[in-house]
Amino acid sequence: MPAKARHEMPDWLLLPVGFVVVSALLLTAPLWIPVAMLWGARYRRRLRKAAESFRCSTCGSVLGAAAVRRADEEWEAYVRELMRKNPGVKFRMVRNVHAICSTCGTPYKYVENESTFVVQSRDVGVRQTDDAGTAGGPHQGQPSPGGNS
Ligand SMILES: [Zn+2]
């Protein structure tokens, strides 16, 4: 079988090929980074728009941008805490809380294709982190289920 040599690149080719691959990635980076950013911005705009027309099913107040911001902050605190407790561990995280009512604290998951929100159980994605200083939030009487090992 002479097929063995076919897959092996001659040594003199490695450097130019590597150079071409790396420069191709570098050259196209300015293209795909804005595309990803635009995609994210579009998603966030739709998310905020949906929040501005959605009334909390618990207290009736409009979620608005503040609810989205609050969910962002809690999510970031949650991720930071997770990283701090488990350094070096890679997590595959699915975010399922995208808005938290700033009046009553009800968490919501954003349903993108219907542009609406559904009530989300609090301890699935974003957990209340007391040490992160959630200023002004209503106090949650329930302790989070202690799964701390
Ligand atoms: Zn509410």
Image: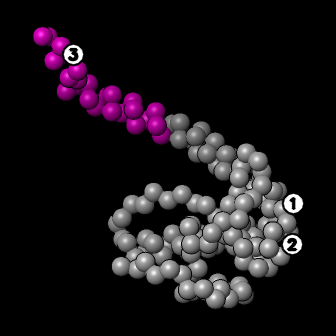
Task: Say which element carries label 2.
Answer: loop
Quadrant hosting residue 148: bottom left
The amino acid pointed to by label 1 is: Ser
Quadrant hosting residue 19: top left
Would residue 5 be counted in the magenta stretch?
A: yes
Q: Residue at x 56, y 86 (%)?
A: 143
> Residue 10: horizontal and vertical position, in percent?
20, 22
Task: Say which element carries label 1.
Answer: loop
The amino acid pointed to by label 3 is: Arg
- Extreme-top residue of the structure: 1
Taking 15 as reference, is 88 above or below it?
A: below
Distance from label 3 to label 2 (Cα)? Answer: 68 Å
Which region shows up in magenta? 1-26
| Labelled disc at residue 60 | 2
Q: Which residue is mark 3?
A: 6
Of the numbered discs 1 and 3, the one sitting upstream in the chain is 3
The amino acid pointed to by label 2 is: Gly
Q: Residue at x 58, y 40 (%)?
A: 32
Q: Cβ of disc 2 within 8 Å of ligand 1?
A: yes
- Extreme-left residue of the structure: 1
Q: Cβ of disc 1 within 8 Å of ligand 1?
A: no
Q: Would you say 82 lies left or right of 51 here? A: left
Q: Nearer the viewer, mark 1 or mark 3?
A: 1
Q: Which residue is mark 1?
A: 53
Q: Quadrant of the C terminus?
A: bottom left
